[in-house]
Image (tube, grey):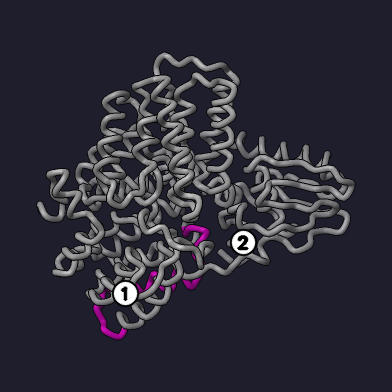
Amino acid sequence: MNQAEQDRAERIELAHEPDFALGRLTVMPSRRELVCQDGRSEVLQHRVMQVLIALVRANGRIVTRDELTQACWDGRVVGEDAINRVISQLRKVAEGTGAGSFRIETIPKIGYRLIAEHGGITAPAHETRPARHAARPNRRAFALGVAAALLAAAGGGALLYRRSAGQTPSPEVDRLMAQAWQEWNQGSREGLSQAIGLYRHVTEIAPGYADSWGLLGCCYADAAHGAPQAEREALRERSIAAGRQALRLDSHNAYGRAAIAFARPIRGNWLAMEQGFRQALRDQPDKVLVRHGLGVSLARVGRLAEAAAEFDQLPDYRLVPGHFGGYIMTLWAAGRIEDAERLAADAAHIYPSHPALWFPRFDMAMYGGRTSAAIAQLQDAANLPSSLGQADLDQLAAVARAIASRDPAAIDAVMAVQMRLARLDAGAAADAMQYASALGRLDEAFAVAEAFYFSRGFTVPDGQDRTGAEPDLASRNTVSLFLPPMRVMRADPRFGGLVREIGLERYWREAGVQPDYRRA
């Protein structure tokens, strides 16, 4: 994939896209707003704005349907009707507020092209995006919230949301609930914000509908785990208040109980969260969203075999790439390698380039002694995640070869790069810690862990867009500690002190359990 193709296919995050001029329009992606020179304005749906950005990035070139699904639907399988509906809405914009500014041309059986008019495009969005660093999409499937854990990489709301028995909302409420779920499915801050607004609206027009209050609470909890420190406590309070209201309306409402459980800071509250999810499932065992939350909670504390058993009960996991990938990683970490490899092979056929599934396959090959298979995956240009540039591929190949060869010079070169990348964001740091463990460089592995979990030695920001903000250490991913490449680190005497300080030792004692690695 050349640079132009990468720019067209790279996932579009509206919050990070700068404003630009398109003909007579000023386009403000972060607000999803178009403002015309004559004073008219229009707010677009999230997906419509994403498709507009994808077409603008192409600068007059054809954008294929595959490129649109990669950039705007995270690469997941969507029907032609979904794309056609968005293009139809965008054409209405072009004929209305955007009249004289642009038009959309269909290239039969290939894709679409945006034709800019009256002054063309000024400062297109892709020219001012920050350069990607050589780091991969991080392993956030276990670090995020109850819903975001499953939805961060793809949609699939029908898989997760089931109306509680006895609740019969109006068609309008049903429509709003489905729309809120779709917005939440995007796995983005702006999508989550839209979902919160829609759930709040439902609570206003149907104040007795418990599910809307419970899911509103879950959204607030999800937002709290990624919010700046000054906003976290207020969001947690909102989550608990909404969850309690759901339980006042329906004392068995699982979403309300899940919201209260998940509102807590993650570190140090694993037992309370686990108990909350289990109680919610006793009340309403059909709530797959809550069962997934329980599985995620068990994975965070090193109980991967039990987590896998919970995920085994979830239906249609293949419909959601993020869920599918998390399931594969859990099976792998639980020692169910044959099951993991079988599902990874299925994933390669269904979603060959989706990062949530591409990286588990790569990891299992690289750490499983199949270096040639890992390198072949890097060289399969037709099925690479669109987020990977050549520098990313080169560094992943260097890591794979260093793990296979154990050559000291190769290991030194890899670790020099990884220790620099570990300072950029939490995902890169988690990767660096795993690479260091797999390469036997335990001093570096524990140095990254000290920074990642305690901000000692250096500070690891939550993300590149949060550099300078105080990191949310309470939400840091702990499942990485229990994955196969961390086996060498777990055998080191220092690991006991690390899990003790994180608080995991106390959880195991109070819960009366042991993590899988101590039972093996």
Quadrant of the rendered structure where residue 61 is?
Answer: bottom right
Q: Position of residue 517 (x, y in %)?
A: 15, 55
Q: Which mark is residue 136?
A: none
Which residue corresponds to mark 2? 7
Q: Which residue is located at x 26 percent, y 39 percent?
A: 274
Disc 1: CA contacts within 10 A as few (<14), some (14-19) or many (>=20): many
User: At label 1, which amino acid type do we have?
Assistant: Arg
Task: Count every numbered label the image shows and give the total.
Answer: 2
Bin the neighbour count of mark 2 within 10 Å (Cα to Cα): few under 14, some 14-19, many 20 and up.
Answer: many
Q: Is residue 297 visible?
A: yes
The quarter of the image holding the N terminus is bottom right
Q: Is residue 379 visible?
A: no
User: Magenta residues?
Assistant: 384-409
Q: Position of residue 161 (x, y in %)?
A: 44, 29
Q: Residue at x 29, y 61 (%)?
A: 365
**In the image, what residue occupies the spot 44% across and 59% down?**
137
Q: What main secondary structure does the magenta stretch of the protein show?
A: helix
| 395 to the left or right of 464 | left
Q: Quadrant of residue 175?
A: top right
User: Percent position (x, y) of residue 429?
Assistant: 37, 67
Query: Is residue 77 rendered to the left or right of residue 166?
Result: right
Q: Amino acid at mark 2?
A: Asp
Against 333, residue 394 (above or below) is below
State whether residue 79 is above or below residue 53.
Answer: above
Q: Nearer the viewer, mark 1 or mark 2?
A: 2
Q: Which residue is mark 1?
A: 401
Nearer-N-terminus badge (1/2): 2
**Quarter-wise, where is residue 398 in the image?**
bottom left
